Structure formats: structure tokens, C-alpha cells
Image (cartoon, grey):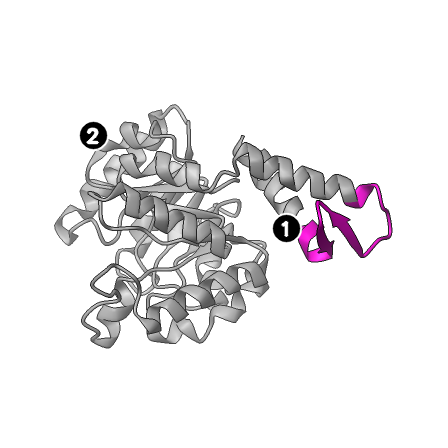
């Protein structure tokens, strides 16, 4: 499952579901957690179950459930069992142990094939468990992080500088989540960009994410999806360059270092080129 772009849509706004489905996003995430008030949780569950039963699938379908500690979880699991989404997004995840706990609940509900996408940085203790996801890599499809719940949890005023950059603590958290995903061998999903009125800043943010090693990104509005898709898609020149690197190594089997266009390339360059070609193939 290629998760280049994942679009959130509130679970109590069913009139938006089809638009989200046809936005071009690789996946839609129907949210039953933060964007739905307690009074509307039941309405959201009914809307999700109804939509899943009649949808014409274009994108992968994920459902963001409430945290494992929530009294809403049993009802959420019932919706997952009825809707049969491609995956669930797990908020307030605290390492592989939390994934195991949800897996057991899903398995008991007959949803053993449902993959899990953890949001892995929303509590202080979660930061110290980011290295544990390798043990559950077969049940998760990726790893993502968040920059909103964590500052609230520790009483921080914000996670961002005035110009929109992350402050030092949250830049560290972003990096740790990125490395945790790659250490587990799963897709690294960049968090949302909240400024809906600044598409050029979104483009720069998404391009920075891919540059740094993220493989996809979450969105909060359909207009963000094309920008994210483009940012996480290698262009023709990048693909051609990667293909040339792979072919150069293929022409020199057994070589650890080669020269191409005046540059010395070694095996990490080959690995990077193969990743570019793999991303391009999946996205197309």
C-alpha cells in the first residue's frame, strides 16, 4: 500500500466523504477522535459504517479510532468490524506494546487483516518507546507523528516558531519518528501542515519532508493533496538519474565504487537510486 498522501475527514461530516475519496489522495482517514465532539461520536460511527457499506473505493480507507484508554474504544472496534477498512490510525500510541494491545482487540473482533498506522509521538512517554516498533512491523503499515498533542501534554505554549518552523524539542521528535519508521522498515509519514492559506509554504514543507526521508504526508484539506502528491513523486529527471546509477552498477557487477558523470558513487548511492525508482513505480 503506497501512502504518499493521506487525507483526514471528520467522521461526523459524511457529506465530505466522497469528495475526500476523489481528491487524489492515496488514502482517506475518517476521523472518530479529535475532530469529533463527544456528543457526535455515535453519529460519526453510524456515518462511517454507512459510507463503508456503499462506497466506490478509489483510495485506501483508514479509520482513526479513539485511544486505547478511551471508553469509546469498544464501539469504535465494532465500526471497524462492520466497515472493514484497509487500516486503522492509532492515536496516543506508546510504542509496540500499544500496537500489540490493539492487535489483540482487532483479532478478537475478526479483523486480523486490518493494518495499523500508529501516531507515535503524542505523549511524553511515547518518545522513549520509538525504538520498539520493529517488533510489530508486520502489523503496522507505517509510522507517523504529531506536533499538536505533545506540547499540550507538557504545558508548552506551542511547537512552532513565529515563522512556522518547529522549535528544537519538536524538531527532535520529528527526527526520532523518522528514524523509528525506517528502523522498523515501514513507511515514514510526515505530519499535517495546518496553514490552509499558504500553498507555497506547504509545498516547501512537503518537499523538505521527502528530502529528509519521509515517504508520504498527511493532509487536512483536499486542496493540499495535489501539492503533497507532487512533492513525494520523483520527477522525470530524478528517475532518469536514478536509472543511470542503477545501470552503471549493473554494468560493473561486484564493484563497490564506480564513477558516473565525474562523480564517485558507492553502494549507499545505489540504494538511494533504487528507492527513487521504487517510489516512482509505486506512485505511478
Q: Is residue 275 above or below residue 47?
A: below
Q: Dot 1: what SS?
A: helix
Which label number is shown at residue 230?
Answer: none
Seen from this angle, which residue lies furthest left? 39
- Horizontal relation, residue 37 to residue 66: left or right: left
Q: Earlier in the sequence, mark 1 or mark 2?
A: 2
- Nearest the camera: 11 or 209? 209
Mark 2 crowd level (few <14, some 14–19, many ≥20, 10 Å Cα): few
For image coordinates 15% across by 46% down, the residue present is: 40
Let me know if residue 213 appears in the view: yes
Report if the CB atoms under discs 1 and 2 are less than 8 Å apart: no
Name the residue that disc number 2 marks: 15
Give, as a single range, the part of the protein colored magenta. Answer: 249-271
Name the residue that disc number 1 marks: 272
Q: Is residue 269 magenta?
A: yes
Image coordinates of residue 83 in percent, x first then y, are: 38, 37
For image coordinates 42% across by 32% down, the residue present is: 59
- Nearest the camera: 163 or 47? 163
Image coordinates of residue 84 in percent, x first then y, are: 42, 38
For image coordinates 26% across by 67% down, the residue present is: 159
Q: Is residue 38 magenta?
A: no
Q: Determine the CA span between mark 1 and mark 2.
A: 42 Å
Mark 1 crowd level (few <14, some 14–19, many ≥20, 10 Å Cα): some
For image coordinates 57% across by 41% down, the residue present is: 279
- Nearest the camera: 200 or 39? 200
- In this view, the mark in front (1 or 2): 1
Q: Dot 2: what SS?
A: helix
- Horizontal relation, residue 81 to residue 254: left or right: left
- Horizontal relation, residue 237 to residue 261: left or right: left
Q: Quadrant of residue 229?
A: top left
The quarter of the picture where the C terminus appears is top right
Amino acid at each position: 500500500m503506497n501512502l504518499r498522501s493521506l487525507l483526514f475527514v471528520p467522521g461526523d461530516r459524511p457529506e465530505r466523504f466522497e469528495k475526500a475519496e476523489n481528491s487524489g489522495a492515496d488514502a482517506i482517514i475518517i476521523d472518530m477522535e479529535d475532530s469529533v465532539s463527544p456528543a457526535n461520536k455515535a453519529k460519526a460511527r453510524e456515518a462511517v459504517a454507512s459510507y463503508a457499506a456503499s462506497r466506490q473505493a478509489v483510495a485506501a480507507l483508514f479509520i482513526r479510532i479513539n485511544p486505547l484508554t478511551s471508553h469509546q474504544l469498544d464501539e469504535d472496534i465494532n465500526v471497524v468490524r462492520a466497515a472493514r477498512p484497509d487500516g486503522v490510525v492509532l492515536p496516543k500510541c506508546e510504542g509496540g506494546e500499544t500496537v500489540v494491545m490493539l492487535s489483540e482487540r482487532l483479532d478478537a473482533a475478526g479483523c486480523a487483516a486490518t493494518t495499523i498506522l500508529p501516531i507515535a509521538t503524542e505523549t511524553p512517554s511515547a518518545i522513549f518507546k520509538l525504538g520498539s516498533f520493529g517488533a510489530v512491523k508486520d502489523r503496522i503499515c507505517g509510522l507517523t507523528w504529531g506536533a499538536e498533542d505533545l506540547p499540550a501534554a507538557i504545558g508548552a505554549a506551542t511547537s512552532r516558531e513565529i515563522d512556522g518552523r518547529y522549535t528544537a524539542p519538536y524538531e527532535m521528535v520529528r527526527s526520532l519518528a523518522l528514524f523509528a519508521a525506517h528502523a522498523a522498515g515501514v513507511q515514514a509519514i510526515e505530519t499535517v501542515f495546518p496553514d490552509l492559506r499558504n500553498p507555497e509554504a506547504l509545498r516547501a514543507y512537503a518537499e523538505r519532508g521527502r528530502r529528509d526521508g519521509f515517504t508520504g504526508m498527511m493532509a487536512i484539506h483536499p486542496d493540499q493533496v495535489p501539492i503533497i502528491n507532487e512533492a513525494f513523486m520523483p520527477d522525470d529527471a530524478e528517475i532518469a538519474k536514478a536509472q543511470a546509477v542503477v545501470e552503471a552498477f549493473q554494468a560493473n557487477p561486484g564493484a563497490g565504487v564506480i564513477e558516473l558523470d565525474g562523480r564517485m558513487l558507492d553502494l549507499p548511492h545505489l540504494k538511494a537510486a533504487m528507492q527513487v525508482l521504487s517510489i516512482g513505480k509505486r506512485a505511478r
